[in-house]
Image (cartoon, rainbow, N blue to C red):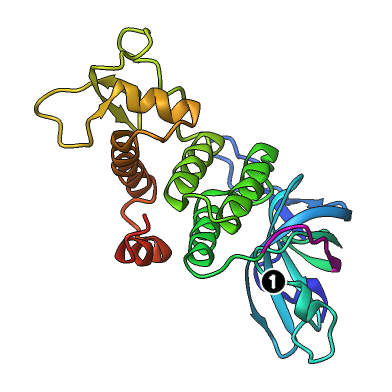
Amino acid sequence: MEIEDIEISIDEIEIVPQLAPGLLSVAPAKRVQRKELRVTHQPGFVLHSYPYKETSLIIDLFSRDFGRVSLVAKGAKRPHSKLRSVLQTFQPLTVAWSGKAEVRTLTGAEWVGGMLPLEKSALLCGFYLNELLTKFLLRHEASQVLFDHYVATLNQLAHGESATIALRKFELVLLQQSGLMGDITTCHQSGTRVQTEKWYVLDPSSGVRAAFESDTVPKILGKTLIDMESGSYSDPVTQSQSKQLMRFLLHHHLHGQALKTRQILIDLQKL
């Protein structure tokens, strides 16, 4: 199987120039060839995989320098394939791939080690992180800050640190790195820093503003916003209000689409 056989791959892009009003003929489309890309020794994590044909897998990989990439792992489903045991979620890998299509060909993957495995509820939290990444990250848009924070969050979960706090921190970084949230400690109406004892609303489209009695969205104390920005979640009020805020923001940006793992975590009172 060649990578070009995959239906969602794109080897060429046709660019049709705009025509001036009244012209009836269509100019020939220009073909833009993608350059062959070869990547080696790239740190990454498998976010998700699914079968492709009889013996292969399609891998959704989160890489440090290339963001989310789709790779076809040829023969990875064969019983004696070395890739079979390597391409697991939450395992740090060094990965190599090549190709010029949208879905490129995995040419190598090695387990790096150095991280404890996720177990029990921490494992479910890990799947929640992966689901968030697949929902919010565009392909081929790298964010080393988010990648490093993902690694740190997996380590926190593996070492038994508070899942609630670890997930709140990750959600905040995810929205900020995705360009969906700016400064949360400055009121956009006045341009001044939020005050700890006053109530605010974080409008997804405009940012932080003073809260009104008629607001139906979560109202948050200025102290909570300051605590979130500094990564301090020791205050139970901060934990409670930040949970309500992040639920609201994620629901808004997902246009009401439910997160499967989040609902399970809510049911287990872990989120």
Q: Position of residue 1 (x, y in %)?
A: 82, 82
Secondary element type, mark 1: loop
Label 1 neighbourhood size at 10 Å, few (<14), some (14-19), many (20+)?
A: some
Task: Decide which of 228, 217 is in the foreground and name it.
Answer: 228
Residue 225 sits above or below residue 115 on the image: above
Where, by quadrant of the figure, is residue 110 drawn? Answer: bottom right
Q: Position of residue 94 (x, y in %)?
A: 83, 58
Task: Decide which of 85, 77 is in the foreground and name it.
Answer: 85
Which residues lie in the magenta part?
107-116
Write the residue at 40% across / 66% down. Answer: 260
Task: Decide which of 193, 117 is in the foreground and name it.
Answer: 117
Report the label total.
1
Write the residue at 52% across / 50% down. Answer: 161
Residue type at mark 1: give it: Gln
**Residue ranking furthest to the left:** 214
Residue carrying label 1: 88
Where, by quadrant of the figure, is residue 195 drawn? Answer: top left
Q: Position of residue 176 (x, y in %)?
A: 51, 34
- Residue 73 shown left or right of residue 108 in the figure: left
